[in-house]
Image (spheres, rainbow, N blue to C red):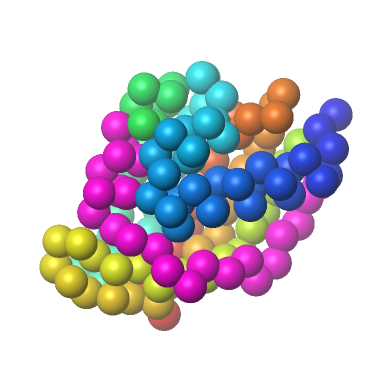
Amino acid sequence: MTDRLAIDQLLRELYAARVRGDLDGVCRTFAEDATFRIAGAGHASPIAITAAGISEIRSWLALMIKSFQLKDQAIVSLIIDRARAAAHWRATVHSRITGAVVPTELVDLVEVRDGRIISYLEFFAPR
């Protein structure tokens, strides 16, 4: 069984690394065989990303970190039940490509094994 405090710390580590733009730090939170999915409603069109394994996850995360800077990140609520967690958080997303700045709501559904994320599903919508 994974400890609630350990999952809380792991998610805070993940979010802090994302805000720093630290690709290695973000990748360290994932297991080698993790799955990673993002489903969102962008202003122009829906966005969907699916990756399996740390190599594919690293590629997507590298693109995301290169393209978007997160600021003003704050966890609104965090629910942890055994090895699963649901996090509602907010951030201001700055596109390094277009220059657009968009306040965004996000919800992550996460499963942890042996201190690393094995399943990650993120939903987001601009505010």
Q: Magenta span has 105? A: no
Quadrant in which the C terminus is drawn: bottom left
Q: Is residue 33 left or right of residue 104?
A: right
**In the depicted structure, whether residue 103 falls above or below residue 19:** below
Q: Residue furthest left?
A: 98
Quadrant in which the N terminus is drawn: top right
Residue at image point 40% right, 77% down:
103
Residue at image point 58% right, 69% down:
74
**In the depicted structure, whether residue 109 falls above or below residue 75:** above
Residue at image point 25% right, 49% down:
66
Q: Is residue 12 left or right of residue 69?
A: right
**In the depicted structure, whether residue 85 falls above or below residue 3:** below
- Residue 122 drawn at (x, y percent): 49, 52
Q: Magenta span has 67? A: yes
Magenta highlight range: 59-81
Residue 41 appears in the rendering: no
Q: Is residue 41 left or right of residue 115?
A: left
Residue 115 appears in the rendering: yes
- Residue 105 drawn at (x, y percent): 48, 70
- Residue 98 drawn at (x, y percent): 14, 68
- Residue 125 drawn at (x, y percent): 41, 69
Residue at image point 29% right, 68% down:
94
Q: How would you classify the magenta stretch by its main secondary structure?
A: strand
Q: Quadrant of residue 29?
A: top right
Looking at the image, which is closer to me, 83 or 21? 21
Q: Is residue 60 left or right of residue 29?
A: left
Count the marks: how many? Answer: 0
